[in-house]
Image (spheres, rainbow, N blue to C red):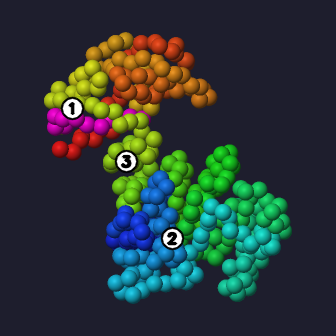
């Protein structure tokens, strides 16, 4: 992946009556055949960013290039309309024409561009998403998952430079959502396309994307592979949003870490003494068979069955954490937790 399909430089957008910028000096680069997910909670700026890429919003500042063509730059008085950006878009509400069949919905853009083989191309796209048998059916005759497949086939049909996905699975039930996320990841890669995928669902972003941009208050806090975002979260906000437990108040000493009343001796660390926030993944904790000095004492508060494994909720001092265990544990039991400190996410408090 060497050629840049999409490039954003210092892109900003502020809406009237809002003091906080929706998007604040964002830089982003999407390479050829790469899928980048924009992940963040509601109000983080991900949808505004997508709309500016699509040409549905104008940037207040900055520059946007698509395949080395500048498409938006207030300083240069450049703005290319959405229909001239050669993009494919998949929305959360499908956006299908109700009076057209599945085949006709997919073929619409091809007929508009006067493709001679529009019918065979549309049929090929429907087959690619596994819908060749419902080509003549209308949207009201299709399930939500099937309608979204039609929307995906339509986005692929014109062979765009870049695909944009705006939370395409948010209206789909859980079982179909898992099936469709695999289909999207597979079909986009098979077509050799680049994509920007907006979602608030961490598992969806991590499964589909090559890299994930995690947004918070209009800023990209971290842009990295899913594994790096998960295992080496750059900030407490990234750790929290990607499902880490915490923050837990700890103290850093020259000898180790103090959590609650327990001092865990550590070697080969370079923290400065002071307070810090600790985040942990549930799979970074496990039950210890004995009360070693490097283990944390806790009390079992709650047990929930997750199918093949139990999620144990345990209290450490005044705080509660969770870990996984193969069998149920009695409520109120005193236990000791062994923590994989190499996977702990520790953020010293700013002085």
Q: Name the foreground residue: 37 vs 239.
A: 239
Instruction: Indicate the position of residue 310 as horizontal and vertical percent values.
Output: 55, 24
Viewer can see residue 120? no
Q: Is residue 236 left or right of residue 82?
A: left
Magenta residues span 271-281
Look at the image and tell me in which quarter the N terminus lies: bottom left
Which badge, 1 or 2, is on the more N-terminal residue?
2
Image point 37% across, 63% down: which residue? 20
Name the dominant secondary structure of the magenta segment: strand
Q: CA distance from mark 3 to mark 2?
A: 24 Å
Image point 53% across, 47% down: which residue? 203
Disc 3 residue crowd, few under 14, some 14–19, many 20+, Cα 10 Å? some
Instruction: Indicate the position of residue 323 as horizontal and vertical percent values.
Output: 46, 27
Vertical position of residue 277 compared to residue 172: above or below = above
Residue 237 badge: 3
Residue wearing tag 2: 51
Residue wearing tag 1: 252
Q: CA distance from mark 1 to mark 3?
A: 20 Å
Label 1 sits on a secondary structure element that is strand
Q: CA distance from mark 1 to mark 2?
A: 44 Å
Instruction: Indicate the position of residue 9 as horizontal and vertical percent values.
Output: 35, 72
Look at the image and tell me in which quarter the C terminus lies: top left
- Taking the view exactly as shown, the residue that stands out farthest to the front is 17
Residue 193 picture quarter: bottom right
- Residue 9 falls inside the magenta stretch: no
């Amino acid at each position: 992946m060497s050629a840049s399909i999409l490039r954003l430089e210092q892109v900003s957008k502020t809406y009237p009556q809002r003091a906080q910028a929706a998007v604040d000096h964002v830089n982003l680069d999407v390479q050829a055949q790469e899928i980048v997910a924009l992940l963040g909670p509601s109000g983080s700026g991900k949808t505004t960013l997508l709309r500016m890429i699509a040409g549905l919003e104008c940037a207040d500042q900055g520059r946007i290039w698509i395949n080395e063509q500048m498409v938006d730059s207030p300083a240069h008085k450049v703005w290319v309309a959405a229909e001239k950006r050669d993009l494919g878009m998949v929305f959360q509400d499908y956006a299908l024409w109700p009076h057209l069949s599945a085949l006709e919905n997919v073929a619409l853009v091809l007929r508009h561009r006067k493709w001679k083989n529009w019918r065979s191309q549309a049929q090929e796209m429907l087959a690619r998403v596994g819908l060749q048998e419902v080509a003549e059916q209308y949207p009201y005759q299709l399930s939500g998952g099937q309608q979204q497949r039609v929307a995906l086939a339509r986005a692929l049909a014109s062979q765009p430079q870049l695909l944009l996905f705006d939370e395409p699975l948010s209206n789909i039930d859980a079982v179909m959502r898992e099936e469709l996320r695999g289909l999207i990841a597979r079909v986009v890669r098979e077509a050799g396309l680049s994509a920007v995928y907006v979602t608030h669902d961490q598992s969806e972003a991590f499964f589909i994307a090559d890299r994930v941009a995690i947004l918070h208050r209009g800023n990209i806090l971290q842009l990295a592979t899913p594994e790096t975002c998960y295992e080496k979260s750059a900030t407490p906000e990234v750790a929290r949003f990607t499902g880490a437990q915490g923050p837990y108040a700890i103290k850093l000493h020259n000898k180790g870490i103090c959590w609650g009343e327990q001092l865990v001796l550590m070697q080969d660390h370079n923290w400065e003494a002071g307070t810090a926030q600790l985040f942990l993944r549930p799979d970074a904790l496990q039950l210890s068979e004995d009360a070693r000095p490097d283990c944390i004492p806790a009390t079992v508060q709650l047990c929930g069955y997750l199918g093949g494994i139990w999620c144990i909720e345990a209290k450490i001092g005044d705080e509660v954490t969770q870990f996984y265990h193969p069998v149920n544990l009695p409520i109120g039991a005193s236990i000791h937790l062994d923590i994989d400190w190499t996977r702990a996410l520790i953020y010293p408090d700013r002085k």
